[in-house]
């Protein structure tokens, strides 16, 4: 037995050692393109929505969603990757849950109704392990909506998004361009805390997405900001790292919005806390958001 093996008798010690060494994610034997799973789930949801709403301007009203393209370009439909091979079941999310999410979200006429249907919605497996629904925070008439990744422990306890360490940094970032929580609306790609703060899986994101989209439709902001990778990939339907996508403007629309809105990605504050060297870019993104708000006023 070497010194390492000698020191670590218990599996929990080994896990603690991995955590100390910076390992925060388990990696499987085979590579898995999780972004492709999100796209597939979106395509699946599109198909289901088409079926559900075939009586109401099918092909228009039933049409998801995130059209995105670089500013100056022509918006291209996203989530059109062809028939889904999978994945309503990814992460334990069934087809019925997906259909129900689409239907319930569409029926909500305001944020209070949306919160109420989410409170009763059992289709996202994350609800089973979470303490509270974390719906959203801020101004329902905000011109700026920010969508983060997932609630953490503090958010789960309080039922309010971005109240922990990264939330405090996000507040400071907003304050740096003269904004506070009453100027914006903040939510996440999923409405319940993933156990152990793991990244939400594609099924969990997909089943919450109709509610996130409806939230954006109801608020009808001038600008959507995706905070970190999962929100950027699911809402803007863009692949790649935030470092490659940030600093660009896209357009975002759902089939039920009167017009596309400007959208951009920023680094997640949790990432900035770990890698402060990127704060300079984050600052320039904030300035760009401020300028875009002024431009669209
Ligand atoms: N990180 C997020 O992405 N969202 C929260 O609500 C809190 C931390």
Image (cartoon, grey):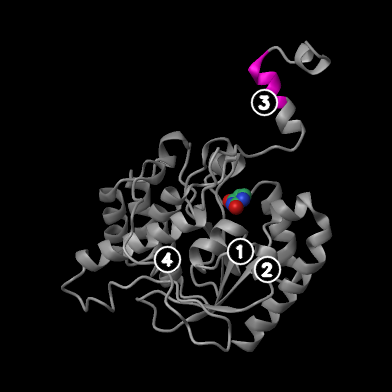
**Coordinates of residue 222 in the picture (x, y in percent):** 54, 79
Whether residue 62 is situated above or below residue 291 in the rendered picture: above
Taking 104 as reference, is 90 left or right?
Answer: right
Kindly identify which residue carries mark 4. Answer: 213
**Residue under circle 2?**
244
Q: Name which of mark 1 and mark 4 comes first in the sequence.
A: 4
At mark 1, the secondary structure is loop
Looking at the image, is mark 4 or mark 3 nearer the viewer?
3
3D distance between C-alphas at marks 1 and 2: 7 Å
Residue 268 position by quadrant: bottom right
For the point 48% across and 51% down, which residue is it? 190
- Name the N-terminal-most of marks 4 and 3: 3
Q: Could you tell me which residue is drawn at 74 percent across and 26 percent down?
A: 17
Determine whether label 2 and label 3 are within 8 Å by CB: no
Rendered-image quadrant of the C terminus: bottom right
Q: Is residue 124 positioned above or below 82 on the image? A: above
Circle nearer the N terminus (2, 3): 3
- What's the CA distance linking mark 1 and mark 4? 21 Å
15 sits to left or right of 256: right
Select label 1 or label 4 by which is in front: 1
- Prevailing secondary structure class for the magenta stretch in the rendered image: helix
Q: Determine crowd level at label 1: few under 14, some 14-19, many 20+ residues with C-alpha closer than 10 A.
A: few
| Whether label 1 touches label 2, CB < 8 Å | yes
Residue, disc 1 = 240
In whole angstroms, how far apart are the C-alphas of marks 2 and 3? 32 Å
Please rate how many residues cluster around mark 3, counting C-alpha atoms within 10 Å: few if below 14, some from 14 to 19, many from 20: some
Q: What range of the chain is rendered magenta?
A: 10-16
In-front residue for pair 227/85:
85
Q: Nearest the camera: 196 or 94?
A: 94
């Amino acid at each position: 037995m070497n010194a390492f093996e000698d020191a670590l008798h218990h599996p929990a010690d080994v896990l603690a050692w991995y955590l100390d060494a910076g390992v925060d994610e388990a990696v499987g034997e085979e590579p898995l393109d999780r972004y492709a799973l999100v796209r597939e789930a979106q395509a699946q949801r599109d198909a289901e929505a088409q079926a559900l709403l075939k009586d109401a301007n099918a092909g228009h009203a039933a049409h998801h969603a995130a059209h995105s393209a670089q500013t100056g370009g022509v918006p291209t439909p996203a989530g059109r990757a062809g028939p889904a091979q999978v994945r309503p079941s990814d992460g334990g999310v069934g087809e019925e849950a997906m259909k129900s999410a689409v239907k319930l979200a569409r029926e909500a006429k305001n944020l209070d109704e949306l919160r109420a249907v989410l409170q009763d919605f059992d289709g996202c497996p994350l609800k089973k392990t979470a303490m509270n629904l974390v719906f959203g925070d801020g101004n329902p008439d905000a011109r700026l909506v920010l969508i983060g990744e997932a609630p953490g422990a503090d958010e789960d306890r309080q039922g309010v998004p971005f109240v922990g360490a990264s939330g405090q940094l996000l507040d400071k970032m907003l304050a740096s361009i003269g904004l506070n929580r009453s100027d914006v609306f903040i939510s996440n790609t999923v409405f319940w805390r993933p156990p152990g703060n793991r990244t939400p899986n594609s099924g969990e994101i997909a089943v919450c997405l109709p509610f996130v989209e409806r939230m954006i439709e109801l608020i009808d902001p001038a600008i959507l900001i995706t905070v970190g990778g999962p929100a950027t990939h699911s809402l803007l339907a863009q692949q790649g790292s935030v470092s490659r996508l940030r600093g660009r403007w896209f357009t975002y629309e759902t089939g039920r919005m009167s017009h596309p809105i400007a959208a951009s990605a920023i680094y997640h504050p949790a990432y900035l806390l770990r890698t402060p060297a990127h704060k300079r870019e984050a600052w320039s993104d904030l300035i760009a958001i401020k300028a875009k708000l002024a431009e669209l006023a």
